[in-house]
Image (cartoon, rainbow, N blue to C red):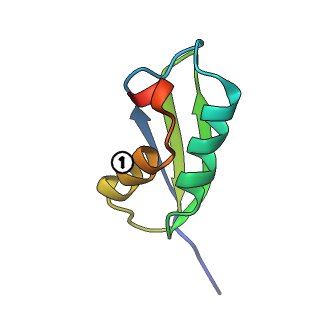
Amino acid sequence: MITVDYSLTVFRVAHLSTETCEACADAIRVAVIRVPGVVGVDVNKAGGSLSVLTDGPVPASLIDEAIDEAGCHGLFG
């Protein structure tokens, strides 16, 4: 039998709000889903949060780096 443990972590993202454009939200989704171990991403602009589903331990620093690399200067600059 194969079992997989999933973990859901919610991150607060500075300056993420309803004012954030969809292009920036999509850039965040794409960048974070590429992090090894991440299997799902949901950007909640209204709540200013990012929900990340993983299939194993993923350091928060990797998520933070992916968000920075998304390059949405209107969101993070």
Q: In which quadrant will I find the N terminus?
A: bottom right
Q: Name the element at disc 1.
A: helix
> Which residue is at a point 52% across and 18% down the rendered structure image?
47
Q: Give the residue drawn at x 33%, y 52%.
A: 60
Residue 22 in the image, given as x and y percentages of width and height: 69, 28
Judging by the rendered image, the residue that carries numbered circle 1 is 64
In percent of width and height, residue 11 lies at 40, 36
- Choose between 74 and 40: the one closer to the eye: 74
Tell me how many marks there are.
Answer: 1
Q: Is residue 52 above or below residue 73?
A: below
Left-right relation of 57 to 22: left
Closest to the observer, 44 or 27? 27
Q: Residues within 10 Å of mark 1 (few under 14, many from 20)?
A: few
What amino acid is at disc 1? Answer: Asp
From the viewer's perspective, is residue 30 above or below residue 42? below
Q: Residue at x 44, y 53 (%)?
A: 66
| 51 horizontally vs 12: left or right | right
The answer to whether 31 appears left or right of 15 in the picture is right
Classify residue 18 by image quadrant: top right
Tell me the quadrant of the picture where the C terminus can be found.
Answer: top left
Left or right: residue 43 compared with residue 67 = right
Q: Residue at x 68, y 33 (%)?
A: 23
Residue 62 location (% of width, % of height):
36, 58
Observer-nearest residue: 9 or 72?
72
